[in-house]
């Protein structure tokens, strides 16, 4: 997810959602040891936009950098593998340039790896992630956020797989030509498909064949059920949380959690306060119209000054607005992990931070990847044992990747036999 202007708020008073102080989490030596030995996998960071549009270097040691992912921050937090999001903003990118923009973002990830070969490596499989862990390097992977990036072309999907993309979110907040999104499902001006179209089903089938994980974060509920019904491989939610706790349409209902568990998939919990804290979500909703108008006015003025819409930077303003809302406690995030573990099962939950896509909207105590050990400690404090925590930190996602790789091998072998 990327917090575009349409999802920010202009909060006039923070008093409506005042929170009690969040007691600092003290990370024990045991928790740090567990964090260091586990393969910690995060399935969603929007850092490539910083690479491409701002010239950010992942090796930066700038103490004033407010970004949430860097090599130092990853090392401090024991992060072993990061899926960098390849997100194309449909509001600022011409549809004929969707694939080009995606390719440019992919190139930006490769360029970062080339700059720091001793600290980060590209990864395309579970074996690669394990190799990176052994070499004490960050494994860099990629996922496309939004199926509009393939421009309704299965050949482009194949090309992106060859370039290293290992999951694709079927839709972003926009309904595309073949998959309904939760982001506009109630907008009568948008033409919807009642889930997946026939071509959308072909996309899922081709992803299964390629060995690309099918991601259902952002999709409408009917799209989810269509997907889980036809996918031959386990699916993932790369950055979603529990709707029973926070009533956002992006989040998954308990029934959806159970259906995904039956599929043997995994839900990677989103860290954004708007998806893990109901008070925060309601404050955002209350001021949405006023904020939209203010941001659109800002963008219009920037355009009038000759700025390319794709490069209009609203992040400083976004941080200022979001700072008006008290950050929810770390407990809110842990509650979602705990809820999904109980309803879907301990084998079906992981971490999908949304780092660098949720500036100013993280829960208390989580400012960057360096703070990931606090989650491990909080899970220990909830009574989870080391084996369970290893699963949640990354083991579950690695299992799904292996299953997806195996299904791909089986489908391609069957295809070859038919030739």
Image (spheres, rainbow, N blue to C red):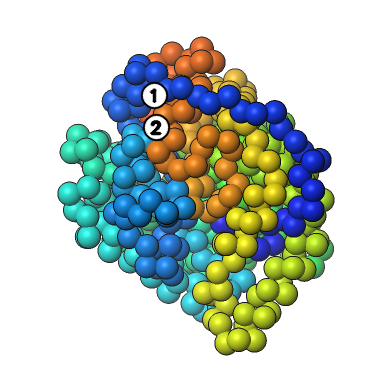
Compared with 134, 160 (above or below) is below
* Residue 85, placed above or below residue 108: above
Residue beneath the point at 67% across and 81% down: 301
Residue at which label 1 appears: 390
Residue 154: quadrant of the picture: bottom left
Q: Regarding mark 1 in the picture, which secondary structure is present there?
A: helix
- Lateral position of residue 317 relative to residue 129, left or right: right
- Which x, y percent locates residue 91? 62, 71
Crowd rating for badge 1 (residues with CA inside 10 Å; few <14, some 14–19, many 20+): many
On residue 399, the disc is: none
Dot 2: element: helix
Q: Is residue 264 left or right of residue 251?
A: left
**Quadrant where the C terminus lies?**
bottom left
Tell me the crowding category of disc 2: few under 14, some 14 to 19, or many 20 or more residues within 10 angstroms, Cα based.
many
**Residue at coordinates 32% horizontally, 55% vertically from top-left?**
60
The residue sitting at 31% across, 52% down in the picture is 61
Tag 1 and tag 2, C-beta contact below 8 Å: yes
Residue 326 in the image, given as x and y percentages of width and height:
68, 41
Residue 172 appears anywhere in the view: no
Q: Is residue 342 visible?
A: yes
Up-down relation of residue 346 to residue 269 (above or below): above
Q: Indicate the position of residue 48 as horizontal and vertical percent values.
A: 41, 60
Q: Label 2: which residue?
A: 394
Of residues 371 and 44, the one nearer the viewer is 371
| Res. 320 image quadrant | bottom right
- Identify which residue, 234 or 148, lies in the foreground: 148
Front residue of 98 and 45: 45
Horizontal arrangement in the rendering, residue 62 relative to residue 364 (left or right): left
Point out residue 113 in the picture as x, y percentages from the top left corner. Answer: 25, 56
Question: Looking at the image, which residue is at 54% across and 59% down?
Answer: 146
Give the CA distance from mark 1 to mark 2: 6 Å
């Amino acid at each position: 997810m990327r917090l575009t202007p349409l999802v920010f708020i202009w909060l006039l008073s923070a008093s409506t959602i005042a929170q009690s102080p969040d007691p600092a989490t003290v990370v024990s030596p045991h928790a740090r040891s567990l964090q260091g030995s586990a393969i910690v996998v995060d399935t969603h960071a929007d850092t490539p936009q910083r690479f491409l549009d701002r010239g950010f270097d992942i090796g930066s040691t700038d103490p004033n950098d407010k970004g949430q992912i860097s090599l130092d921050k990853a090392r401090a937090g024991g992060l072993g593998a990061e899926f960098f999001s390849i997100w194309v903003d449909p509001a600022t990118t011409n549809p004929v340039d969707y694939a080009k923009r995606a390719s440019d973002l992919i190139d930006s990830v490769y360029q970062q790896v080339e700059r720091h070969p001793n600290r980060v490596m590209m990864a395309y499989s579970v074996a690669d992630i394990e190799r990176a862990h052994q070499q004490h390097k960050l494994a860099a992977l990629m996922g496309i956020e939004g199926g509009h990036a393939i421009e309704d072309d299965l050949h482009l999907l194949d090309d992106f797989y060859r370039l290293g993309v290992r999951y694709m979110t079927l839709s972003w907040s926009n309904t595309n030509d073949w998959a309904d999104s939760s982001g506009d499902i109630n907008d009568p001006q948008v033409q919807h498909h009642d889930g997946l179209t026939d071509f959308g089903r072909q996309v899922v089938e081709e992803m299964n064949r390629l060995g690309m994980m099918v991601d259902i974060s952002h999709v409408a509920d009917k799209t989810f059920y269509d997907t889980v019904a036809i996918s031959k491989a386990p699916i993932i939610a790369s950055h979603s949380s529990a709707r029973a706790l926070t009533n956002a349409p992006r989040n998954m209902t308990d029934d959806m959690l159970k259906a995904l568990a039956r599929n043997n998939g995994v839900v990677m919990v989103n860290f954004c306060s708007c998806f893990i804290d109901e008070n925060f979500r309601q404050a955002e909703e209350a001021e949405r119209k006023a904020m939209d108008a203010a941001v659109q006015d800002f963008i219009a003025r920037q355009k009038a000054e000759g700025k390319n819409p794709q490069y209009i930077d609203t992040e400083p303003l976004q941080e200022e607005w979001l700072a008006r809302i008290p950050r929810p406690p770390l407990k809110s995030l842990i509650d979602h992990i705990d809820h999904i573990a109980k309803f879907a099962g301990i084998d079906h939950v992981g971490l999908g931070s949304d780092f660098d896509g949720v500036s100013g909207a993280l829960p208390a105590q989580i400012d960057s990847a360096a703070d990931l050990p606090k989650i491990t400690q909080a899970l220990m404090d909830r009574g989870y044992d080391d084996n369970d925590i290893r699963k949640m930190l990354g083991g579950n996602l690695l299992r799904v990747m292996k299953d997806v790789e195996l299904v791909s091998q089986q489908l391609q072998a069957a295809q070859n036999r038919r030739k």
